């Protein structure tokens, strides 16, 4: 006997969110991102959602000093 899979064969869009199952659809109808449900509606709790944490620190890029003379930025 085969088990019943609750996921849709193709994600559906609800309020701009990709939804894979009925729970995702219910959350999206309430404007809750199914990928980050702890962020709450309209991401009001996004700052305290651990699934949204990014790596600490900013990425710093170093470019050669001569780059500014090689790019024409006049418009």
Image (tube, rainbow, N blue to C red):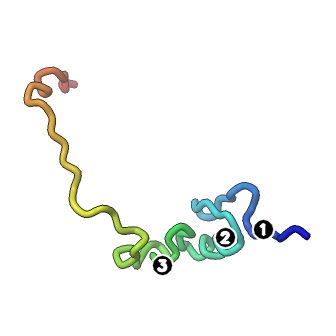
Q: Residue 10: image x %, image y %?
A: 72, 55
Q: Residue at x 63, y 73 (%)?
A: 29
What's the CA distance linking mark 2 and mark 1?
A: 16 Å
Q: Is residue 28 left or right of residue 50?
A: right
Q: Residue 25: image x %, image y %?
A: 66, 70
Residue at the extreme front of the image, as rendered: 1
According to the picture, the residue beneath numbered tag 2 turns out to be 25
Q: Residue 13: image x %, image y %?
A: 65, 59
What's the CA distance linking mark 1 and mark 3?
A: 24 Å
Q: N-terminal of the two: label 1 or label 3?
A: 1
Q: Secondary structure at mark 2?
A: helix
Q: Secondary structure at mark 1?
A: loop
For disc 2, the neighbor class at 10 Å (few under 14, some 14 to 19, many from 20) is many
Is the C-beta separation of discs 2 and 1 under 8 Å?
A: no
According to the picture, the residue beneath numbered tag 3 turns out to be 38
Quadrant location of the N terminus in the rendered image: bottom right
**Frontmost residue, 22 versus 31:** 22
Q: Residue at x 78, y 68 (%)?
A: 5
Quadrant location of the C terminus in the rendered image: top left
**Frontmost residue, 6 versus 48:** 6
Q: Residue at x 60, y 75 (%)?
A: 27
What's the CA distance linking mark 3 and mark 2?
A: 15 Å
According to the picture, the residue beneath numbered tag 1 turns out to be 5
């Amino acid at each position: 006997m085969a088990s019943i899979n609750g996921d849709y064969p193709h994600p559906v869009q609800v309020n701009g969110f990709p939804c894979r199952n009925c729970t995702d659809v219910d959350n999206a109808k309430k404007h809750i991102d199914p990928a980050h449900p702890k962020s709450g509606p309209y991401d009001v709790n996004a700052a305290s959602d651990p699934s949204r944490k990014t790596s600490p620190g900013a990425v710093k890029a170093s470019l050669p000093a001569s780059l500014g003379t090689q790019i024409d930025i006049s418009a």
